[in-house]
Image (tube, grey):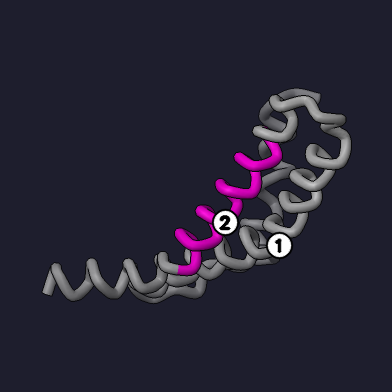
Amino acid sequence: MKPKLILIFLLIPLIVGAIENPITATSFEDLLNSVINFLKSTALAAAPIMFVIAAYYFVTSEGNPEKISTGKRIIFYTFLAIIIILLASELVNVIKGMIK
């Protein structure tokens, strides 16, 4: 298939209006809050998976200090990421207050 023909097929839904804009934010603050909420839900969904991976490293370490260290680092950085993501919305409010 020629590249122009592929591009036309990709643009047809846009031309007929079948695809709507998924971003419903009307201001930059709304957009930022939407991104933060998406990151929160993604991080909170990924955190248990990371804890299971860390547990796997602990269980399969067989006394190997490198695997134990890797498991500890995964747990530490997972907690750190959760804290940062949960405080992100408050950070937006602090920055907004500083700008005003």
Say left or right for 93 vs 53. left
For the residue marked with disc 2, what is the amino acid? Answer: Phe
Which residue is found at the position 74% from the left and 53% from the top? 51
Measuring from the top left, give residue 22's x and y in whole percent: 58, 67
In the picture of the structure, the residue carrying the numbered disc 1 is 45
For the residue marked with disc 1, what is the amino acid? Answer: Ala
Say left or right for 76 vs 89. right
Other-residue count near label 2 (Cα within 10 Å), few / some / many at <14 / 14–19 / ≥20: some
Quadrant in which residue 25 is drawn: bottom left
Measuring from the top left, give residue 2's x and y in whole percent: 75, 23
Q: Which residues are magenta?
A: 70-86
Magenta span contains residue 71:
yes
Which residue is found at the position 22% from the left and 72% from the top? 96
Say left or right for 78 vs 99. right
- 47 or 24: nearer the eye? 47
Measuring from the top left, give residue 59's x and y in whole percent: 86, 41
Magenta span contains residue 94:
no
In the picture of the structure, the residue carrying the numbered disc 2 is 79
Looking at the image, tell me whether mark 2 or mark 1 is earlier in sequence order: 1
Determine the main secondary structure of the stretch shown in magenta: helix
Q: Quadrant of the N terminus?
A: top right
Measuring from the top left, give residue 69's x and y in whole percent: 65, 33
Q: Quadrant of the C terminus?
A: bottom left
- 25 or 15: nearer the eye? 25
**SS under mark 2:** helix
- 66 or 94: nearer the eye? 66
Which residue is found at the position 62% from the left and 59% from the top? 43
Query: Relative to 77, does residue 34 appear above or below in the rendering?
Result: below
Query: Could one spot residue 98 in this view of the protein?
Result: yes
